[in-house]
Every structure is written in C-alpha cells, then in structure tokens.
Amino acid sequence: MTIETGGYTEKQLLRMIRQWVPRERVPQKVRIKDTADFFRVDYDDVVVLDGVPFFVRNNEREGRFGLEDEPKFWVKRSINLVTGGVKVLKWVFRERFSSRIGDLVFECVRSPRKEARILELVRGRPDFMQGETVPDSTGNPLRILDYIRGKTLGEAILTLGADHQEFFYRYYPALLDEFIGVVEAIRFLHESGEKHGDIRRDHLIKDSATGRYRWIDFDFNYRHGASRFAYDLFGLGNILIYITGRGDVTTHRLLRDDPDVLNRLSEDDVNIVFHNRVANLKKVYPYIPDSLNRVLMHFAAGAPVYYDDTRELLEDLGEARDELFDNVK
C-alpha cells in the first residue's frame, strides 16, 4: 500500500515542524505513517490527510466505566503543519454495549458516520465542537476536530464556592442559565432528527476563548425503541443533578458525613442511573426550591413519569429558574 505523503519530503516536514514546536521537541527523523491503522500511528509521527500533514503529539484520554484517564488510542492530538493549529484526529473505532436505565435497555454503538453528519449540521454553531471529515487510506471517515481549550463542566463546578450554600446562592443561578443554554443546543439536535448519544459532564467544555460551554463527542448512537431521545434526556438529568449538588452527592458520603440525612432517604430518592447518587437533593439541601427539585425528581428511581422531550424539560427549567431568581433577589 502506498502511503500518502502529499509530496512532502522529510526535509520539508522537519522545517515545518520547527515552525511550531520547541527545538528540544523536534524529532531527529520524520516518520510518515499510513492512516489505515491508528495503533501504528504514534508520538512524533506525521500523517497526511487530504494533502495536509499533521504532526502527532499524544493520545487523548477519557474516564469511562469507572476507569479514569484511560487513553483513547483512536483519538490523537496533533498539529496542522500548514497553519500551526492544534487539531484532534479521530479514527474509526468499533464499540458496542448495552445500558439499562430503569426498565429501559439501550443498545449503544459508535457511529463515526453519525458524528460526521452532525459536524456538518452544527457547522458554525458556538455551542458545539467544530471539525471536518476526510477519508483515511481505506475510505473510513476520519474526523479532524478543532481542539477546544478549557475545563470540562465537571472540573469547573468543583472550584465554585467554599461550600454548597455559598455555591448555590452565589454561582448556581448563572450556572443554571448556562445549563439551559446547552439543553437548547441538544433541542436543536433533536428537532433536526439527531441524537447526541453520549451526554456526560466531561463532554461539555467551557471554551476559554469564548466563555461558552460546547458539546463534544457525538459518535455514539443508540437504538431507542419507543423513546427516541430518552438516553440523551437521562444524560441531561445526570448533569443537572451533578451541578445542583456541586458534585456527586453519594450515599457513601452521607453515611460518613451526615448519617441523619441518609436515614431520611428512601430508595425512590436516588438517581435512576447511578443508585449510589442522590437525586432528591432537597432532602440534603432544604433551601433548593421546590420547582427545581421537581425537575431533579424526574431522574430519580421513584419517578412516576419521565421527560419525553427537551421541550418539556426546558419548560420546567424555565419555571425553576424564575423561582430561583426570585429567591436570590
């Protein structure tokens, strides 16, 4: 198989690398790798995509299924050697698993073509990651994504306030406004017939350049049965519970720090997805307004009904926002 070089010589590539990389990080020799197998592409390699050379720096990392900071070998940070821009190269990776939420079972699968489709749909929107899709040497869709500098939502929340009460009255109202904005972005996807597929707090990054939260990673799809957007909605609920609690309020933490509160909880009060996390946060923090707690309870194990769509969720969030702002005036 002929490896695409874009017509670049090793001497030219080294000169381009020196433009963008500190002297001590410039390799002695340039290796141009084929794009067919991401496992063969490593640190200091160059891949050429659609005629443009990219200098690979490292594998991206992510936590999943209780494993923190796991390398994603199919996702590599790189430098566009023409522009100097930092890009994330995302190869095709096959993955399939089942997820259960209450009585609902979702069959989840990675779909690079879905992500490529959504990248086109959200082009130019400041609330989503941006990128383009080009074929690798075997014709599979390889996504070239703009790197977003900033903290994930999960990282940002934990820095706000000395304790929960200060956080809730000083920072939470603005945070709830931001959350409503990112739900509006998911509403746009749903009304366009698309799903995010992997809504998590680390898939929201606060862009340090704009100050706005942006959704990343749209490559999971799921078989939805009767409720097309339910998996996305439960993901939004998990994020809302997390930000309202200023982190995960777990039964283990309550057992250690506040056993009296734990004794007041029932099985119906925990998160429908993660049974060690509390959804009924008003029992922990009594100053949480009723209207906001009613939204949280749609994502509790004892919820009699769930949200069918983002429109319903946004209506209730609007009511909760109004009550919250009345309380903090």
Image (spheres, rainbow, N blue to C red):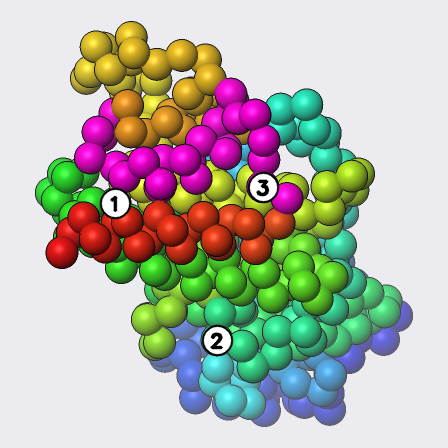
User: What residue is disc 2 on?
Assistant: 126
Give the foreground label among 1 and 2: 2
Marks 3 and 2, the one that precedes in the sequence: 2
Residues tagged 3 and 2 counted as in contact (Cβ below 8 A): no
Q: Is residue 7 left or right of residue 10?
A: right
Q: Is residue 5 above or below residue 283?
A: below
Q: Residues within 10 Å of mark 1 (few under 14, many from 20)?
A: some
Residues tagged 3 and 1 counted as in contact (Cβ below 8 A): no
Q: Main secondary structure of the magenta part?
A: loop
Quadrant location of the N terminus in the rendered image: bottom right
Q: Residue 97's x, y, as percent?
A: 72, 34
User: What residue is disc 1 on?
Assistant: 158
Q: Residues within 10 Å of mark 2 (few under 14, many from 20)?
A: some
Q: Amino acid at mark 3?
A: Tyr
Residue 85 visible? The answer is: yes
Q: Amino acid at mark 2?
A: Pro
Q: Amino acid at mark 1?
A: Leu
Q: Which residues are magenta?
A: 284-308
Measuring 71% from the left and 60% from the top, which residue is drawn there? 194
**Closer to us: 314 or 3:** 314
Q: Is residue 108 left or right of residue 160?
A: right
Marks 3 and 1, the one that precedes in the sequence: 1
Q: Secondary structure at mark 2?
A: loop
Measuring 55% from the left and 32% from the top, which residue is drawn there? 65
Q: CA distance from mark 1 to mark 2?
A: 24 Å
Q: CA distance from mark 3 to mark 1?
A: 28 Å
